[in-house]
Image: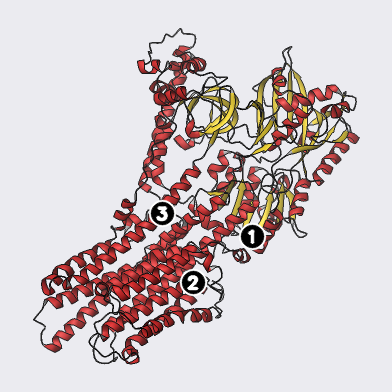
Amino acid sequence: MESYLNENFGDVKPKNSSEEALERWRKLCWIVKNRKRRFRFTANLSKRFEAEAIRRSNQEKFRVAVLVSQAALQFIHGLNLSSEYDAPEEVKAAGFQICADELGSIVEGHDVKKLKIHGGVEDIAAKLSTSIVNGIPTSEHLVNERKRIYGINKFTETPPRGFWVFVWEALQDTTLMILAVCALVSLAVGITVEGWPKGAYDGLGIVLSILLVVFVTATSDYRQSLQFRDLDKEKKKITVQVTRDGLRQKISIFDLLPGDIVHLAIGDQVPADGLFISGFSVLINESSLTGESEPVSVNSRNPFLLSGTKVQDGSCKMLVTTVGMRTQWGKLMATLSEGGDDETPLQVKLNGVATIIGKIGLYFAVVTFAVLVQGLFSRKLQDGTQWIWSGDDAMEMLEFFAIAVTIVVVAVPEGLPLAVTLSLAFAMKKMMNDKALVRHLAACETMGSSTSICSDKTGTLTTNHMTVVKTCFCGEIKEVSTSNKSNHFRSAVPESAVKILIESIFNNTGGEVVNNKENKIEILGTPTETALLEFGLLLGGNFQAGRKASKIVKVEPFNSAKKRMGVVIEFPEGGLRVHCKGASEIILAACDKVISPNGDVLPLDEPTTNHLKNTIEQFASEALRTLCLAYMDVGTNFSVDSSLPLQGYTCIGIVGIKDPVRPGVKESVAICKSAGITVRMVTGDNINTAKAIAREIGILTDDGIAIEGPVFREKSEEELYELIPKIQVMARSSPMDKHTLVKHLRTSLGEVVAVTGDGTNDAPALHEADIGLAMGIAGTEVYPKCSSFTFLSGNILTSNIDLTGGEVVENVAKESADVIILDDNFSTIVTVAKWGRSVYINIQKFVQFQLTVNVVALIVNFTSACLTVDMISRFTGNAPLTAVQLLWVNMIMDTLGALALATEPPNDDLMKRSPVGRKGNFISNVMWRNILGQSLYQFVIIWILQTRGKAAFHLDGPDSDLILNTLIFNSFVFCQVFNEISSREMEKINVLKGILKNHVFVAVLSCTIIFQIVIVEFLGTFASTSPLTVRQWFVSVCLGFLGMPIAAALKLIPVGSN
């Protein structure tokens, strides 16, 4: 079976599956009882094709718009254009001078002419009653007026479906509809022949059973949809940085309004249509909207920013002009939201299993019906009444047909693929409580198979709460603490050196020091930036004054290849200066001068170079992140269009930044090792810093290798094949180093790889990995000395630039990721792996349970119908399990079984098993052993009851057949009840451990037993049962219970590997 599944249903990958693969498996699933239910949680391919058509249309539209705007620029330059536009009265009455449609046409159409007519960005801001400096006023009345005129930043979504929609969908089951027709015919014939109410019992029994199945199924599906709705809300919780009332603040992306001033940085998604106000080196990736991969430069000449595009480079301020469904992104998202997520490989495989069993069941159903009808003909031939047909004969034929259809109902395990979704929904909901947001269903199950984790260091293995604790300025190493007074530090460093240090910190930064709503100072930016800005404030610097003392004319954001960032500033009196900072050894290598102890600039000689290199190594060996700051005066000859110089800098000094290891990481790494998962550290930090931390937490062992990125990328393919299994730490790595490592682990070594990433540069590795884990912290850390300072680390829409390894929180990483770790904690990654394993094991348990019921129900009804009682003379033409009883059994094994087994919470023992890996069989040898052993036991028990039951229980009256069939039905159900308990563990004998903690399991089991008693004792007329004696009940329960020791004995039989 496994080879058939891999061949026909194995093309679907955990992510990035081709459209052909998604279409192919759907065509193979031709035995489907209810298409709406079976394919509910699969991608809507037609909607995806529609979205792709919109993208192609956008691409052509924007291409034409750009050409038109370029042509327009040539004609309108220098012309005195007059505006004929007059805003509608409603807009004017609300206090604005431009309507939403006019704004939309300017940005979406890249209409330079209209922009010029309206007076440019500043005049449009005035017409929107906003300020490009202070943003919009936030009084409730003005905000409501703005919403009324311009709309809100939400796209149209499909309204949530109510409970009755799920009931209607459950009724779409083809087999249930056929049974409903059978029931109606049975009612008509029965009432005609036997009268009311006796003739209606059989038909009403089937109708009630169908309704019960439909309502239980609909209830389960509805609750599942509510869980997904809650998770979807969590996924959409995105905050943006805006300026309102002159204060920087974070707001929900859905609260964004035209007139808002938004701060964008590298990696951010543009949250609405808007216009560029100011910024540096802005490159926009519009592929999500147009399919065009070439980035577009945005500046004052081309100021148009489109919602849904991404900032590939640079940072800027934008004026929001159009929101929600007025944007092309809103229209595209409305279509894409209906496209749904890709189905998971496990869903597809289980659809394959359902198809195989469905084919077998269909064959058995046809043969069973044929044999039952042949048995009826044989009896009539022996009685000589073959030409005389009565209403009873018609009812018997109808019952045969109903049994055949019900065999198909039981045989086609429609609940198998849905059990995956149920288990994943349950796990995803629980993982949210454990600080992990799963964006793609497949990631949950894939994480359970992971064999390797490539983790960042900063913020994942460490706390991400950074402070400058050591410095080396003017040749002297000093410790820094917040308790030290700034004048104590400054007294030991020449004033000229302190001045240039503060100038470097406050100008060459991706962070900001701003006033928040409470009029307290906030430091915005990454943890590294906040640490440096905090240090600058401790030195007595003033951020705003430092910025006003010069003008920034060029910014080169942090580059993972160069591992540095730089700015060019212009002084009021003339002259330009370049400030540069980044990885210590790289910046130091670019310096040829240094600031001496007395503040003079001297050539960098060998002893000083060695002293600085030793300082870097000393700081790194103490697990400090090191950063070197440098500057260069370039006079007035430098062109802002040129790249920053690579050599000739003056070294200002080195800072050592402390980032403590997270509590619990060492234990989590040990858990991963015991679970067969290899943890590798991939960081942009200094190799000594990386090695020190890796040894502390148990990643780097004596037989492991720590390597630097530049050395790694020089290796040949053959050398990499030998080297990669031994690599435990990679330092000074570039994004492509990380990508190469992940690719080799996946393709050459066949590992299932999880990768953590938190920056735009991590996107290629996250995309390549089997599971991408993005860091998503947006917490607040309080300044340790003064309550008037607050540090916001890792905000989504700030200038998130980290200088030693790219460890930042950005939307590009999140867009490429499958799971977002909300607390940036490595221990949470281990929790995700545990839940992933739990999902995989739970589905295996459910499949084992359901296939056992399938096999026994099929064989029992088939053999009972086809084989003789005395094995010689004649066919019995009788099936012990009626249509109503089989529907009840179907509900036990389908909806209720999935609820009980697919929602089992994880236990610590899961992380003591070896990972399944890439090539593990889903239906394992262990499962086949349990299925076949348990099926054989149940079949033998039922066969003995059929052949010897009357004698054993002294049944000889007119109701003997009915009582015997009731006994068989009752024993069969209790076999499933106790088999459900045995299925809690596939290999362990103790199946009762923790059973009372799983309230869902206990509730399902209790309901099954109670309803079974009701069916047997009180619903006999509808279910074709007869009340049983205490002795018969005792035997039924005991026969079911005996399945547990049988299951325990089976687990002692060794079956080898998959």
Q: Which of 971/1015 is in front? A: 1015
Q: Which residue is mark 3?
A: 223
In the rendered view, would you say 928 is above or below 266?
A: below
Q: Position of residue 188 (x, y in %)?
A: 14, 68
Q: SS for tag 2?
A: loop
The mark closer to the camera, 2 or 1, is 2
Can you tell which mark lies on residue 457?
Answer: none
Query: Label 1, on which residue?
Result: 677
**CA–CA distance in space, label 1 to label 3:** 35 Å
Q: Is residue 936 something that shows in the picture? A: no
Q: Position of residue 882 (x, y in %)?
A: 28, 75
Q: Quadrant of residue 838?
A: bottom right
Residue 783 seen anywhere in this rendered image of the structure = yes
Distance from the alpha carbon under mark 2 to that under mark 3 = 24 Å
Q: In which quadrant of the rendered image does the N terminus lie?
A: bottom left
Q: Nearer the viewer, residue 798 or 465?
A: 465
Q: Earlier in the sequence, mark 2 or mark 1?
A: 1
In the picture shown, does residue 869 fall above or below 417? below
Q: Mark 2 sits on what residue?
A: 983
Residue 148 located left or right of residue 464 = left
* Left or right of 753 in this view: 4: left
